[in-house]
Amino acid sequence: MTNLRLAWRKSLNGVMLTLTGVAAFGVVAVLFVILGFLIWNGGTSLNLAFFTQLPRGEGEIGGGMANAIVGSLKLLFLAAVIGLPIGLLAGVYLAEFGGKTFAFVTRYTTDLLNGAPSIVIGLFAFSIAVLPVKHFSVLAGGIALGVMVIPITVRSTEEFLRAIPNSLREGAMALGANKWKTIATVIIPAASGGIITGMLLSLARVAGETAPLIFTALNNQYWSPGLSQPSASLPVMIYIYALAPYDDWHRQAWAAGLVLLALVLTANISCRLILNRKGSSRSV
Amino acid sequence: MASAAQGKDAIASKLAPKVRAAEVSSTPSAKESALRFKISDLNFFYGPKQAVFGLNLKIPTNKVTALIGPSGCGKSTFLRTLNRMNETIRNTRVQGEILLDGQNILAMDVVGLRRRVGMVFQRPNPFPKSIYDNVAYGLRINGYTGRLDDLVEHSLKRAALWEEVKDYLHKSAFALSGGQQQRLCIARALAVDPEVLLLDEPCSALDPVTTAKIEELMFQLKDSCTMAIVTHNMQQAARASDFTAFMLDGKLIEHSETPKLFTTPTDPRTEAYITGRFG
């Protein structure tokens, strides 16, 4: 009787261990399958020309996506300039100054903004930066991505500032530092690793956004000078090339996907490295 | 040692000219000048809850005053009113008068007050910076522009930490042991040359050997600094202090010279506490 029960318990344990293990393996596998797919299909198009040449005309073989790579970097730069300072300052407010009601409203709104569909944010940028000037521009795309960067930066900044023990705040204030000096010279530097990580992750997150760019930065076959012209970007190029009826364009779309994923993975891994370095110096 | 003495003069002249002037002008009699703090009818509230009741206490200059009492008796709260640290907590209120060298601290600029009244906390709280930058922090934020090196060295020497860290000044303060970190926090507080050092259970997180070092340090600092220490350790109060105040339920029960309080307490509650019958 007891043996039977024991055997049942053991087998149940085994089944559950297998199920959870398979699920965990699946999570890991998904990333590697995607990576493998990208390399398999796009690896051959990933040559020097891809990084240095402009796209060729309809259906022509060869060419590259140099303008889209630069365009994506420009968009990310704009998103950083627009979104990161606002996100950082609002995060500092929530963690260090926030009262009850206003902080609650801000936090709640931030979460709502974070959940807002990216296409809606694209519409917003379209209506404030495209309609008034009657043409698409990198700037409009940068605004759309910048708005998306804000909520992620706010919440990660707040979390990392809250993790700094209060004793550091008291220590600085007991030496005659006022609140802002305490925050600027002790608290933010102490949380800097985490804050930078949050910023990089938020940029990595918007790097692959396509929907908000389609009707803001649009696309461009050529180089896009300055900030007021439409511009190519990697996600939009992937979208267009993948739907086109040419095999070479499909391969280039895969290659662009590979570049984009490599960009995001690099950001993620460097975040890990920054955090580990900060963490190890603390635990000594 | 000569450079250390110069360093101290440099602080006195460059950092706190107003402080020195105030000290000189507020010494009407020899008897008054021997008192650093004079606290009258002090009441303190956390929201509706009163934590300190009608407290009167005199803290003599360049002596160690110990505050003892069971947990929650208000001794830490009282200590934190002396440099107005409680103001960082929402909904707190203070009534009464606290005179520092004859000046009411409640009407004083809080930054200037905290420079004159330093504080060391229960757990070492070094900043995540180098040892050097920790000590220099108070000087830098107060806009001190002179040579920092001498003052950092002088402060670390005063905190009896110099010999142990002089070759590692630019290493992270987190690399130090708990006791070294606490002495670093003392050095950090001493760097701005405060008249008073408030110590809020500074040894409760330290082992006995390190505790002895801190007590030895307090003894050396007495020449130049007034100290008030909150402690749960009655042996520590008996060893390290000149005066002891016993608090219970937010009220000051008894205050006298340390040997007297521990040998012939006048209040039965003091006797009960120091003989270990409660608390």
Image: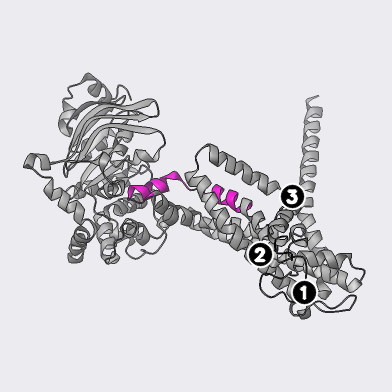
State which region is magenta: A152-178
The image position of residue B90, as x and y in percent, is 42, 36
Disc 3 and disc 1: Cα gap in Å?
28 Å
Residue type at mark 2? Answer: Leu
The chain holding disc 1 is A
| Disc 3 target residue | A117
Of badges 3 and 1, nearer the viewer stands 3
Q: Residue at x 26, y 41 (%)?
A: B107
Q: Residue at x 73, y 58 (%)?
A: A126
Q: Quadrant of residue B36?
A: top left
Name the residue that disc number 2 marks.
Answer: A76
Mark 3 belongs to chain: A
Residue A65: assigned label: 1
**Three-letter amino acid code of the residue under disc 1:** Met
Residue A157 among magenta residues: yes
Question: Could you confirm whether marks 3 and 2 are on the same chain?
Answer: yes
Magenta stretch holds residue B272: no
Magenta stretch: dominant secondary structure: helix
Quarter of the view holding residue A181: bottom left
Callout 1 crowding tier (Cα within 10 Å): few <14, some 14–19, many ≥20 = many
Q: Are marks 1 and 2 on the same chain?
A: yes
Disc 2: CA contacts within 10 A as few (<14), some (14-19) or many (>=20): many
Q: Secondary structure at mark 2?
A: helix
Task: Specify the quadrant of the image occupied by residue A261.
Answer: bottom right
Q: Are marks 3 and 1 in contact (CB under 8 Å)?
A: no
Say which quadrant the C terminus of chain B sits in.
top left
